[in-house]
Amino acid sequence: MSTLLDVDDLRVTFPTRTGRIEAVRGVSFSLGRERLGIVGESGSGKSQTGRAIMGLTPPQAEVTANKLAFDGIDLLTASPRDRRALRGKRIAMILQDPKYSLDPVMSIGRQIVETLRTHEKVGQAEARDRALAMLEAVQIRDPARVFDLHPHEVSGGMGQRAMIAMMLIAGPEMMIADEPTSALDVTVQLDVLGILDRLVSERGMGLIFISHDLRLVSSFCDRVIVMYAGKVVEQLAASELGRAQHPYTRGLLNCMPKIGADRHPLPVLDRRPEWAA
Amino acid sequence: MTAALSVDRLEVVFDRFRALKGVSLEVQSGESFGLVGESGSGKSTLLRAIAGLAPAASGSITVNGKALGARRDKAFYREVQMVFQDPYGSLHPRQTVDRLLQEPLAIHGFADGEKRIQRALDEVGLGTGFRFRYSHQLSGGQRQRVAIARALILEPSILLLDEPTSALDASVQAEVLNLLEEIRRRRKLTFLMVSHDLAIITHMCERLMVMQNGEAVEHLTAGDLVERRVTRDYTRNLLRASDGFVRT
């Protein structure tokens, strides 16, 4: 398996009034053309990890690593211009809530066309055709109508599909999905995941799926990284989740209510300081 | 046993859109009742109509045997309190926790505010150390605990819970659900709880109603769901969704 992304000892530090806060503290992993899940609670550093790879860390923060390379390109020393060329073209990112991540004053079609024409030299008419084809690929039934709608005119599920269409149109090799379905209804979640799953496997992309829902991630990904307080506490194959060793991983699995399991009260996480050490 | 809350053929109309199309339900005193459905199914509107936040076009609502008029009086809010979905939006950003909790006490003219605030904070597991913080200094779970404390401080008998944990992490969700269960047991409260997650509803509620497009499509008990005795495809879809992603 060829390695697409190589991360070694990634650290993201934020300077604050009360000292430096390390949001990500030495994360290492590599990604091939596979589905990798990153799981953790709020504040575990999972989103900052994704953002550092994408190059979207806020300017005041400091990103260091022994190695942060995408397909042999060193992302830490790459110029802003080079990174901009990568972003959207070869690495794409889906954010949590389409209400905030889509441009509210631009029609959905124009946003998709804009992404495409930023990265490829195509004419207006061809760009439109490809955008429509992409909207169809994410199972939007009437692409021509949706093309002209603005984000506030579509539902959350539809907006997230449009977002996926926009991210996939330039044909990226790697996709980072940061809680792509958390803002959606349970039933719509499955549709969107199904679409994402099909497109990712058809195109042989590498996927990093960031979520706080361990069970969802394990049903979707090949491999799972569990993060706590900026560190990786456990790395395992999704199929072996039942044999998780770390008490934090087991706690995350157990704390969800399940139909048919009568557990009152629900087990809660007993957070230990040594996990963060 | 008397019904703590009964809703009879309630209609809610926004402009020309019928958000609720004649929904009826009865919740017994001390019971925990769940409302399930997708976005736009009217489950939150039903809750808001009961709380007086959405206009009822027709139908009736009865709380503890007393029919409600178009306006809710103070006595109503002593009995019925609501916890909202988004703890980031439902707490005043420029008020301390103390100020937030004092407001309902001042409105209802309680004299023993000091004691009540301390007790409410203890009850939701925050302690008095949080009393003079602002909501932006709290985590999502802590904020939702403050919202629950605010609802409890008037000692209501009915709590309306509108997706109280959907904005929270799974691990924090477990803590808040446990807290709600414990409070209900201790205070013998009646719950009416909205969620799109069937697993949460079966965990928290004895009976539930499935809603779609402003109508009640199915009444079930938690046991029915566990044994998958459901008659409607819509409910079956919701059940399947709660099992998680399955690759086809």
Image (spheres, helix red, strand yellow):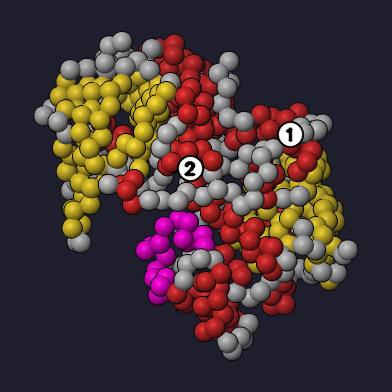
Distance (Cα) linking label 1 and label 2:
29 Å
Q: Position of residue A109 (x, y in %)?
A: 43, 26
Give me the residue at 40% from left, 40% from top: A40
**B217 left or right of B81?**
right
Q: Position of residue A160 (x, y in %)?
A: 48, 32
Q: Are marks 1 and 2 in contact (CB under 8 Å)?
A: no
Give me the residue at 58% from left, 59% from top: B179
The amino acid type of the residue labelled 1 equals: Thr
Position of the N terminus of chain A, as image quadrant, is top left
Q: Is residue B116 magenta?
A: no
Residue underneath mark 2: A251
Q: How many residues crowd mark 2 within 10 Å: few (<14), some (14–19), many (20+)?
A: some
Residue underneath mark 1: B235
Q: Position of residue B159 (x, y in %)?
A: 68, 63
The number of numbered badges drawn on the structure is: 2
- State which quadrant residue A228 falls in: top left
In the image, residue B43 sits, relative to residue A159, either above or below, namely below
Q: How many residues crowd mark 1 within 10 Å: few (<14), some (14–19), many (20+)?
A: many
Q: What span is colored magenta in the figure?
A: B129-145
Tag 2 subunit: A
Q: Position of residue A163 (x, y in %)?
A: 43, 29
Q: Nearer the viewer, residue A107 or B191?
A: B191
